[in-house]
Image (cartoon, grey):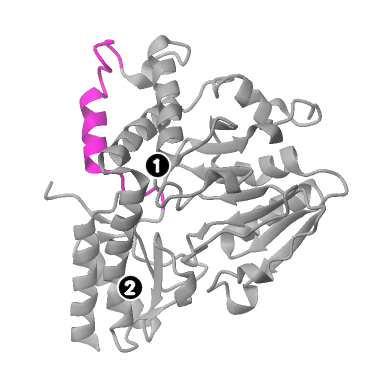
Amino acid sequence: MANRALNFNAGPAALPLEVLQQAQEQFVDYHSAGMSIMEMSHRSAAFEQVNNETQALLRKLYGIPDSYYVLFLQGGASTQFSMVPMNLLQAGKPAAYVMTGSWASKALKEAKLIGETTIAASSESDKYNRIPDLSSIVVPENASYLHITSNETIEGTQFADYPNVPDNVPLVADMSSDILSRAVDINKFGLIYAGAQKNLGPSGVTIVIVRKDLVSDSLKHVPTMLRYDTHAATDSLYNTPPSFSVYMVNLTLKWIESKGGVEALEQYNRDKTKLIYDAIDLSGGFYRGFAQEGSRSAMNITFRLQTEELEKQFAKESEQQGFVGLKGHRSVGGLRASTYNAVPHENCKTLAEFMQDFQRRNG
């Protein structure tokens, strides 16, 4: 489609065109039901089938064992910042957090409201332009869990590998911005959570993958809606779910499967982000990557130019050329290209060419 924007938004973000077109076809009349999926009861057989199939697809594509629940919740990752400590933080056993940037900071802030916390490692002294060395992460033996943010959307950093934790300490990861963008050994984690609006679908649904032994039904002091056992016991249908968002995740997972699964997407993502990183690295200093090389994200590419004036000019000219979402987050400044699963290779190629042309004209 000629009029599609070159969408590099950080989230909500680009969705696969094929998925949007399929949703459009079924929007008014879902499988000859005479109504949209949005109009159906979440107790209906049709929606229950979508709910179950989406969970099964996610298990298959991500290699999620039967020893984990897959939950579809609401409230975004920001609600998980509270739900995780509400459900997992035990008295006298601090929750350990690796401080990698804006989202890790928000997660820690919420956990502090619930109970005792400790910082296991931090890259704040480097303005969060890197992921702390795994060897520097100190996890207390009695920690309730270790929390990481696998990819920092704002700073553009990503864990290349995951920390090892003592056997009795669950590893918890906020994977909002890189879930299903690369293969992951689920068994390393006690709990993974992610807002869907970057790699899995539209905003509205939050994916939680939690090891069954971590889900307790004895947390009577925690409000019903904020307990994992409530949703595990009801297949995420305790209350009205974000049904349209779950349906869109279903279509997106089928699209991922059609592309060869997570491993194929991982290579695709590497290839397309390399185009943009090469434009930065081969610019002779005209562009400067914000993240240190070993910590660079394959999802969010953050970079600066010599002056803020030049950055404003870049943002303005890129908008005129049909690019969307290239301004950096207000807390960091600069520029940012978010290259999630659904961002096409050709869009990244077009951006790299624009960057080279901008350099020729302004270098």
Q: Where residue 97 sits in the image (x, y, percent)?
A: 69, 58
Q: Please report the bounds of the magenta region as a residue range.
A: 11-35
Q: Residue at horizontal 60%, vertical 32%? A: 67
Q: Residue at horizontal 23%, vertical 31%? A: 22
Q: To which residue does mark 2 refer?
A: 277
The secondary element bearing badge 2 is classed as helix
Q: Main secondary structure of the magenta part?
A: loop
Q: Is residue 247 visible?
A: yes
Compute the Cα span from label 2 to label 1. Answer: 24 Å
Answer with mark 2 or mark 1, whichever residue precedes in sequence. 1
The secondary element bearing badge 1 is classed as loop
Label 2 neighbourhood size at 10 Å, few (<14), some (14-19), many (20+)?
many
Q: To which residue does mark 1 refer?
A: 200
Label 1 neighbourhood size at 10 Å, few (<14), some (14-19), many (20+)?
many
Label disc, if present, on residue 258 of the rendered structure: none
Report the side of 247 relative to 71 (left or right).
left
Report the side of 13 relative to 4 (left or right).
right
Specify the amino acid type for callout 1.
Leu
